[in-house]
Structures are given as C-alpha cells and as structure tokens.
Image (tube, helix red, strand yellow):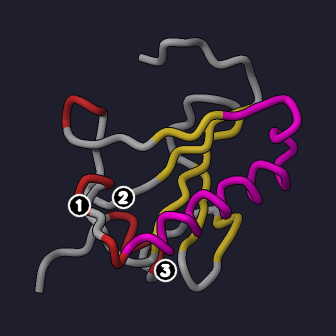
Amino acid sequence: MADKTLFEKIRDREIPAEILHEDEWCLAFRDISPQAPVHVLVVPRKAIPRIGAATEEDVEILGRLMLAAGEVARRLGVAEDGFRLAINHGRNGGETVPHLHVHLLGGRALGWPPG
C-alpha cells in the first residue's frame, strides 16, 4: 500500500486541520502557510495526483471542487470583492503535495500575473 499524502491524512483525521467544508466529494480547510488573508485548500476525497492526471471519470469531482470553492468564498465573505482559484501542476507549477487541490485566495487585492 502506498503512503498517504498529507491531504489524505487530513481527510482521515490523522493530522488536524481547520475544516471549513466537507461533503461526500471534497473537503476544504485553511492552508497552514497562507499567502493571503483567506487561503483555503479545496481537496477531493479521491486521491487524484494532479489536474493533468484527472480522467473522464473525475468530471463530477472536478465540478464539485469548483462549487465547494464558491460556497466557501461566500461563507468567508470574499465572494463579493473577489477571490482567486489556483491549481498547481508539477514542480514548475508550484505543486508541493501530489494530491489535486484548489487554492482559494482572497481578502486582499491579488496582483497579475501571479508568481
């Protein structure tokens, strides 16, 4: 059996996290190294390594991630002023955990282009 990713350990409650949303498809929790006043990770329960590894069978999961991100943004009060969703893929894309996740960033003006 392969080692669990950090996010699988959070999902399984082996590592504590401030969980803000949870449903049958995904969970959302605060990032431990926030890059904005609001920095939440939305993670599928299924361990998909990265967005480029998602398949047709993951279509519903991908949509559920986006819906959850929007719901969390509304709940945290950043939807009206604006927020950013980011998905990192691979080392050059900034990926540090090999488990697909969406970064929800808000609470301040976010520059463009990023990074």
Specify the amino acid type for callout 3.
Arg
Q: Residue at x 54, y 79 (%)?
A: 25
Residue 106, image x, y percentages? 70, 33
Gap between marks 3 and 1 measured at Cα? 25 Å
- Given residues 63 and 101, the one toward you in this image is 63
Splitting the image into 4 quarters, where does residue 96 fall?
top left
Q: Residue at x 60, y 59 (%)?
A: 29
Is 39 placed above or below 6 here?
Answer: above
Q: Residue at x 61, y 52 (%)?
A: 30
- The numbered mark at residue 100 is 2
- The numbered mark at residue 13 is 3
Q: Are marks 1 and 2 in contact (CB under 8 Å)?
A: yes
Q: Which label sits in the foreground, 2 or 3?
A: 2
Gap between marks 1 and 2 measured at Cα? 9 Å
SS assignment at label 1:
helix
Is 8 placed above or below 83 here?
Answer: below
Gap between marks 2 and 3 measured at Cα? 18 Å
Residue 15, image x, y percentages? 45, 70
